[in-house]
Image: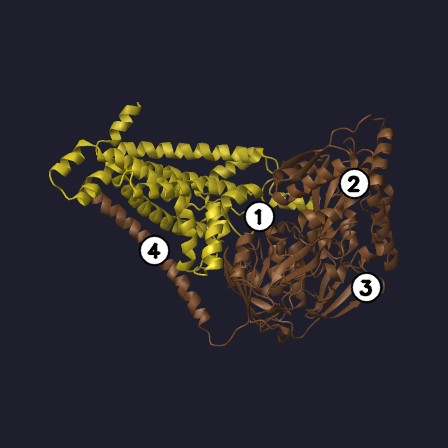
Chain colours: A brown, B yellow
Amino acid sequence: MRKKWLPLVFMALLMLVLAACTASKDAGKDETSKDGGKKEEKVLRLNNGVEPSSFDPSVAFDAVSWAPLNNLMEGLVRLNDKNEPEPAMAEKIDVSDDGLTYTFTLRDNAKWSNGDNVTAGDFVYGWKHMLDPETASPAAFLAYVVDGAESYNTGKGKPEDIAIEAKDDKTFVVKLNAPTEAFLNIISNPSFFPVNEKVATENPKWFTEADSFVANGPFKLESWDHDSKMVFAKNDQYWDKDTVKLDKVEWAMVNDSSTEYQMYQSDELDISTVPSELAEQLKDNKELTNQDQAGIAFYRFNVDKKPFTNQKVRKAFALAVDQQNIVDYVTKQGQKAAHGFVSYGLTNAKGEDFREVTGDLITFNKEEAKKLLKEGLKEEGWSKIPAVTLTYSTSPDNKKIAEALQSQFKENLGVDIKLKNVEPAVFMTEQKELKHQLSRSSFLFDYADPVNAIESFVTDSTMNRTGWSNKEFDKLIADSKKETDNEKRWKMLQDAEKILIDEAPIVPLYFYNQLALQKPSVTGVVRHPVGYLELKWADKK
Amino acid sequence: MVKYIIQRFLMMIVTILIIATLTFFLMHAIPGSPLDSDRTTNPAIQENLEKFYKLDQPLSSQYVSYLKSIITFDFGPSIKKPNETVNSLISRGFPISFELGMVTILVAVISGVILGTLAALRHNGVVDYLAMTFAVVGISLPNFILATLVIKVFAGELGWFPAATWQSPMHMVLPTLALATGPMAIIARLTRASMLEVLTQDYIKMAKAKGLKPWKIIIRYALRNAMMPVVTIMGTMLASILTGTFVIEKIFAIPGMGKYFVESINNRDYPVIMGTTVFYSTFLVVMLFLVDIVYGILDPRIKLHKKEGDAS
């Protein structure tokens, strides 16, 4: 009796292993049959890092969802290689003289991958789905410029009152509540993509699997092995399919930068990010591409906590930061030092860059910093500076920067500060509750307009998190939103940014960038400062 | 025996309930919420989200609905991955972690036992020293270092195996190697130690005296008794390896469930934290139970019902 048990256990184990092996054998076969295709296919192999959070255009709210989704679908406009919105699903865009009414005429050959026509109704359906409070879309605020959108989303209004309308199958009309220069740019965001009403009514979960997914962009979703791999194939129903050169795009989901780099080295990937520990070693590599990303790393002063209650002390600390030094010797990822809050890459109608026009608003100045600190202490009657603790969320990169700042404050101001790191989610909560004195922050643009960044610091904004409030600043932002003359509006925003930097509730560090290794055989991949990876024009030799 | 199993079963349920309750309250005690983000947040949108995930309800009613979810084993949707339910995450990730874990365990047990036995038989000889040096290195070298190393050497330099992802048996080789080395070293050391002890026992001398073949003595008499400590650690080892390992799965981009244990806590993804905790603790308790049964098989002197008598 006893002896019969052991073989049984072994048998069970053996069967488990066999079962496991059959599963992986199938996977192997799958691959060989794919490789066995006769025609030389152009397959671009990318890494998305992780599984996209959602392919529901209304719910997706992160780069890992938007980068793939932007190539599967298309809104009324699409950003071109100069980062300007161009007609896409729409063929013609008419704007009324007051800048409030937009009339979009859709293309006759705008089609879904299942052959259905893309109609104005699909846009109405998609946008209302995003604004429905039940959808709980984190991106819904982007649509608040549309009349009636905010009240519906906050549960006060009715869906019928949103000022969007399908005049006929091909005509989509939107009314805004204020003239918004960035409107066309805003609607290039995936949240404003159409949703195929017919498909979505039949299957509300159409976006979760490759079989049910309907695309209207350059590519369609051929297969989606969750958490593991996605394959995009060229969409032959796409109106501009002749421009699309790639046959396939394969997306791996490798969430480890050094593995990703090894896969790039062993030719399993065509594009890879740069692991921060290898940044210096790879900095002269010919395969490196470096592009602006609209976003900034900065530190916040808490104006309710001593010593940062005093403007001169804040400014002194801000002037003691050597941004160029941090970019060159600490981060070493090719970022641009930030001497203002609005990133590079945001241009007006004349093609002028906001950052370049506004110029440097703050640069490292040790003498001035020391002088201001002395004056500040005198104003407050402090004989020595109250203790300062700098808080950052736990990560090796944040730590390096925090330590650099600590030594810069010591060297340039003669002030010893303490460092404290906190688990990221706890850090976020504490920062929102204004518990830190000096803390690390970042901002990424939602749409390509300076106001998106600057308005973070109006009184009581959830992004303010400094306790800082300035009436003149608030008024400039509020006025800029009503201003129809874009030149005047631009000027107001420049003035507001000057106040922000001069009052110094924050100190800018560096602007983000998109650094990647890309095989020389790959061309035409477009990375927008605000926007998502664009593969429509990509090619591989 | 039946009475013992029923008692153990009831104890298991109580244990899981206690673990689940503790996790629930600890999880809500840490600051931060799954809906926190660094971006501009609109209070209205925040409210929509809280309502959607029922986070606006008082903790007590969240606890009740969560207890319900344990009984039905339906933990609802993940907060960070709105398309997925916790069940779909587990049912997709677990088979993959299990597959890798099973291969790893087999490799570790077979090679560990062989290595340990050889070392014991050649006690204080060259084989012994080599095997034990290997074991010490295996135990002290963290598997993430080993993983990076094998990727660099076997995928990067030599190009024999793919660096990462999960597609074919070839893709399994490197992660298995990285994952199995540690447990194998532990098993080798345990086997060696208990084998040395067993080999001095009277019944082995008796067998030798009777002229039985040496390999027969080892396999039939010595090994069987030497396996007791190995079986003891197998329970926890199985549970932790079969449910996936965060680091190895991350490095090799294996779509198993190991990452959810860590990511769910970093994200404060409450349903996923609860789902993975309950799943893991159930698995662990069952494994420990099986180990107790295997004890009885290996060593008939351990009577299950007797143990129960000892306890009272």
Sequence-first disc among 4 and 3:
4
User: In front of the other: label 3 or label 2?
Assistant: 2
Point 47% across, 76% down: residue: A38
A15 vs A198, left or right, is left
Residue B89 position within the rendered picture, expressed as x and y whole percent measured from the top left: 48, 50
- For mark 3, give the secondary structure: loop
* Amino acid, disc 2: Ala
Residue beneath label 3, please?
A351
**Chain under label 4?**
A
Q: Closer to us: mark 4 or mark 3? A: 3
| Mark 4 lies on residue | A19
Q: CA distance from mark 2 to mark 1?
A: 39 Å
Circle 1 residue: B80
The image quarter containing residue A468 is top right
Q: Earlier in the sequence, mark 3 or mark 2?
A: 2
Q: Which residue is mark 2?
A: A320
- Label 1 sits on a secondary structure element that is loop
Which residue occupies 27% across, 46% down?
A9
Q: Chain of mark 1?
A: B
Residue at mark 3 to residue at mark 2: CA–CA distance = 33 Å
User: At 76% from the left edge and 46% from the top edge, which residue is drawn?
Assistant: A456
Callout 3: chain: A
As drawn, is A501 to the left or to the right of A284? right
Residue at mark 2 to residue at mark 4: CA–CA distance: 64 Å
In this rendering, the label closer to the viewer, 2 or 4: 2
Asked if disc 4 and disc 3 are in contact, CB closer than 8 Å, the reply is no
Parent chain of label 2: A
Q: Nearer the viewer, residue A396 or B43?
A: A396
For the residue marked with disc 3, what is the amino acid? Gly
Q: Tell me the amino acid under the disc marked 4.
A: Ala
Q: Are marks 4 and 1 in contact (CB under 8 Å)?
A: no
